[in-house]
Amino acid sequence: MREDRIRQALDRCYEAVLAPGLWADALHELAQAFGGAAMMFYPYERDLSASDPRDPRRSLSKVPISHEYMEVVEEYERSRWYLNHYRAERGLPLMVAGRSVVIEHQLATDEERRRSRHYNDLYLRFGFPGYAMINVPMVDQSWCIPMLRANRQEHFNPEEAAYISRFVPQFRRLISLSDKLELEKARAATTGLDAVNAPAALIDWRGQVHSLNAGAEALLGPDLHLVRGVLAPADRRSNAALQAMIRNALRVDRTAVASMQPSSLIARRGGRPILAEVLPLSGIFCDLFNHAQILLLLTDLARLPVPREERLRVAFGLTLAEARLAVRLVAGTELRAAADELAVSYETARVRLRVIFQKTGTHRQGELVALLSRLAR
């Protein structure tokens, strides 16, 4: 292992943070620099009492992975090799306990490997007998970086494990940088939905809120709140339905949209409910490390759709004062009350309304509201 070669490969990984299409090549280069043949990123659950921490619950092909690892991972998922896997059963507790790098000889004896289906029918079948797992604990999500060695290479030894552990801070910075960049992308996406009056939440692979836009935050209150990062309606039936919908959306193949439960209602005391609709993310909207898995659209059924003032000004040439009056009328405010809110006389408001009728080609207030409401979508 040459340190200069490792650092050059790490530089390629930093470039891949900005250009995800480079990950496969960057990780291939990094694996070779560490004397390996393949490597990938793997999120793991630190709470070993949780429902089977070995089950990835989502496609591992979505995380950064080198070319050589892809075929192994496809078989790993297809045949459910992650169940009763000795490397996960024995390696994860060691990482949770604080071990920086775990190698194959710390997970099984030579005799156990001779009898292991996982070792013989999966890893030896693809020509990768050697193994090391690098532990990268983070605040929100801990990561394991598995690395394979091919038949022509020796097993990782304790001295090499100690050397590799020196680079854990580099991996932590790499993941942290990606987190920050992806968080900004997620915020930008949900903020854009604010512009079209669409409250939205990005939900990560654990079912927790990754980010909320301003519209969704405004819906939080006694009937809908965050509990340990999870959107939780106060109404028990609504909560059960919402969590079931989110779990279902996270588990199904993203292409199988038709099989998903697409919506549920969140009941509110003394008011109309909130409609929750789930949309799987893919392509550029799904971030690199799969923090954001689904988009949850929230519609307040008690709220009338109100267009933005700027949109009315552009569409109909309204002045700022006219647009402000029009927005209040669309929201259901009576003309006299709207005048009071705007601190103008009732007669001034009537004059402005007549101008608005003229500019929009309408003649009655109901006709005006029906027209302008269309711009609230």
Image (cartoon, rainbow, N blue to C red):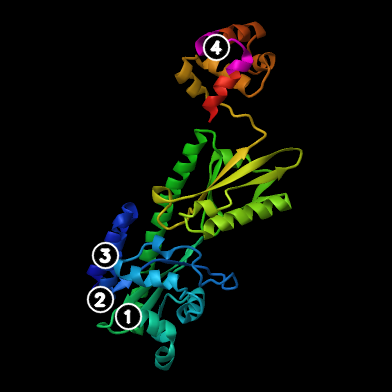
Q: Is residue 12 above or below residue 238?
A: below
Disc number for residue 324:
none
Disc number for residue 160:
1
Q: Which is closer to the viewer, label 4 or label 3?
A: 4
> Residue 227, can we see it?
no
Distance, label 1 to label 2, CA atoms, is 8 Å
Which comes sooner in the sequence, label 1 or label 4? Answer: 1
Q: How many marks?
A: 4
Which comes sooner in the sequence, label 3 or label 2? Answer: 2
Distance, label 2 to label 4, CA atoms, is 74 Å
Reading the image, the residue beneath label 3 is 9
Disc number for residue 356:
4
Distance, label 1 to label 4, CA atoms, is 76 Å
Which comes sooner in the sequence, label 4 or label 3? Answer: 3
Q: Main secondary structure of the magenta part?
A: helix
Amino acid type indicated by mark 4: Ile
